């Protein structure tokens, strides 16, 4: 341990389209929605995370809510930087005389371009990061669910987040083949909004669509343990009057079918690219599902029926990537696949 180690703060950041998680000292210290509220006139950020989410869809002409990440990558550089800075501030609310230097490991989608990678790195450095490492999301997810990624054994991980679905086959500490598609949780929300407009003549916002997905979202029209019907409040598109409608899980499964079929096609495409020896390993080990999308009722069964392979949903799939990023942070020397 070095003399000035106390001046270095180590952070593992899962910078997601929907949520951002920060791990410090093996604990999740920040778990907030990836959203900021900005004063349009001054350009100043007035709220981040949960406080900004409360304002989404309810702002007036002087305030705007921005989601800095779209499809897993930074869409608004300034807002992303302010969001990272604000979330780091939540870990150190007391202002000390000596600012700790930050060592960060941030996870990124596997299908990211060099320009998008640079944007993540620059945002982290401008927010105070002295040493910034990057790790691909499927690799972080595999480490987070307890897979020994250094072994000469093939494992397939599907990480369905807010902006991207990452499918990767991992062996010997590297990604052998991967498929990254920009169809994920946000698209499922859009499907629900569209369905409510078309089928129920009702206009709803993204937060209500998210609530429907959580309460009655399903990947199959027939489930063994179906959730109870859910009451939805929104605006009637004919009269403009607020109304209440009831939706069932089988309706929502029908609404989500198109996007889920795209994820299935990407899984089959990744399996086609897999070398035969690793395909034999996957036949034995099965497929691992992580990310918020893994919580969708019946998704594991649907993918299993399509691929004829066993599908395992990770424990606490929402935090699997963050946990893996935290483990990578503690073992920076052991993991040569961390990108500088």
Image: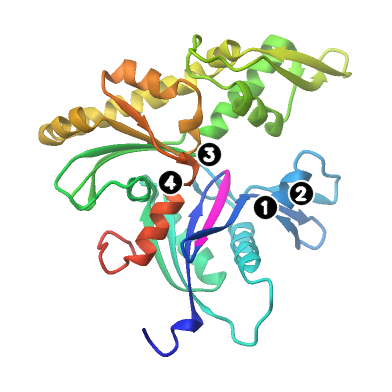
Locate residue 156, reporting x and y percent: 27, 36
The CA distance from mark 3 to mark 4 is 14 Å
Q: Which residue, given by chain and number where applicable, does mark 4 sit on? A: 320
Look at the image and tell me whether residue 180 can be seen.
no
Q: Which residue, given by chain and number where applicable, does mark 2 sit on? A: 64
The vertical placement of 302 against 148, above or below, is above
Looking at the image, which is closer to me, 111 or 151? Answer: 151
Quarter location, residue 178:
top left
Q: Main secondary structure of the magenta part?
A: strand
Identify which residue is drawn at 68% across, 71% down: 93
| Magenta residues, start to end | 18-23
Locate residue 15, reporting x and y percent: 51, 53
Q: Which residue, given by chain and number where applicable, does mark 1 sit on? A: 49
Identify which residue is drawn at 75% across, 42% down: 56
Secondary structure beneath disc 4?
helix
The CA distance from mark 1 to mark 3 is 15 Å
Looking at the image, which is closer to me, 65 or 277? Answer: 277
Q: Which residue, given by chain and number where applicable, does mark 3 sit on? A: 162
Magenta stretch contains residue 196: no
Quarter location, residue 105:
bottom left
| Drawn side of residue 261 relative to residue 58, left or right | left
The CA distance from mark 1 to mark 4 is 20 Å
Identify which residue is drawn at 76% across, 17% down: 202
Q: Are the residues at dot 1 and dot 3 in contact (C-beta closer than 8 Å)?
A: no
Dot 2 surroundings within 10 Å: few (below 14), some, or many (20 or more)? many
Of tags 2 and 3, which is closer to the observer? 3
First-in-chain label (2 vs 3): 2
The CA distance from mark 4 to mark 2 is 31 Å
Image quarter of the N terminus: bottom left
Locate residue 12, reporting x and y percent: 46, 61
The CA distance from mark 2 to mark 3 is 21 Å
Q: Are the residues at dot 2 and dot 3 in contact (C-beta closer than 8 Å)?
A: no
């Amino acid at each position: 341990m070095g003399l000035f180690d106390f001046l270095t703060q180590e952070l593992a950041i899962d910078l997601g389209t929907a949520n951002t998680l920060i791990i410090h000292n093996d604990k999740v210290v920040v778990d907030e929605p990836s959203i900021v509220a900005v004063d349009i006139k001054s350009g100043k950020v007035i709220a981040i995370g949960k406080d900004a989410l409360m304002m989404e869809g309810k702002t007036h002409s002087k305030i705007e809510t921005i989601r800095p990440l779209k499809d897993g990558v930074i869409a608004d550089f300034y807002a992303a930087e302010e969001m990272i800075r604000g979330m780091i501030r939540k870990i150190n609310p007391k202002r000390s005389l000596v600012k700790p230097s930050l060592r960060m490991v941030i996870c990124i989608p596997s299908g990211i371009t060099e320009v998008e990678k640079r944007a993540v790195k620059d945002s982290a450095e401008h927010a105070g990061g002295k040493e910034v490492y990057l790790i691909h999301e499927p690799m972080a997810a595999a480490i987070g669910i307890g897979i020994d990624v250094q072994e000469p054994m093939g494992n397939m991980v599907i990480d369905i987040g807010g902006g991207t679905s990452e499918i990767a086959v991992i062996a010997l500490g590297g990604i052998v083949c991967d498929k990254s598609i920009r169809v994920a949780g946000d698209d499922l929300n859009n499907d629900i909004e569209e369905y409510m407009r078309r089928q129920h003549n009702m206009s709803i916002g993204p937060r209500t669509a998210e609530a429907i997905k959580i309460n009655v979202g399903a990947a199959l029209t027939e489930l063994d343990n179906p959730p109870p019907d859910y009451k939805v409040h929104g605006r009637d598109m004919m009269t403009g009057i607020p109304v209440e409608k009831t939706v069932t899980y089988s309706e929502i499964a029908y609404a989500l079918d198109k996007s889920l079929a795209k994820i299935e096609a990407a899984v089959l495409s990744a399996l086609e690219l897999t070398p035969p020896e690793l395909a034999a390993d996957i036949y034995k080990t099965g497929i691992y599902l992580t990310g918020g999308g893994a919580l969708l009722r019946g998704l594991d069964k649907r993918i299993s029926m399509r691929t004829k392979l066993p599908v395992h949903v990770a424990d606490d799939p929402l935090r699997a990537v963050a946990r893996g990023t935290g483990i990578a942070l503690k073992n920076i020397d052991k993991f040569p696949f961390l990108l500088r």
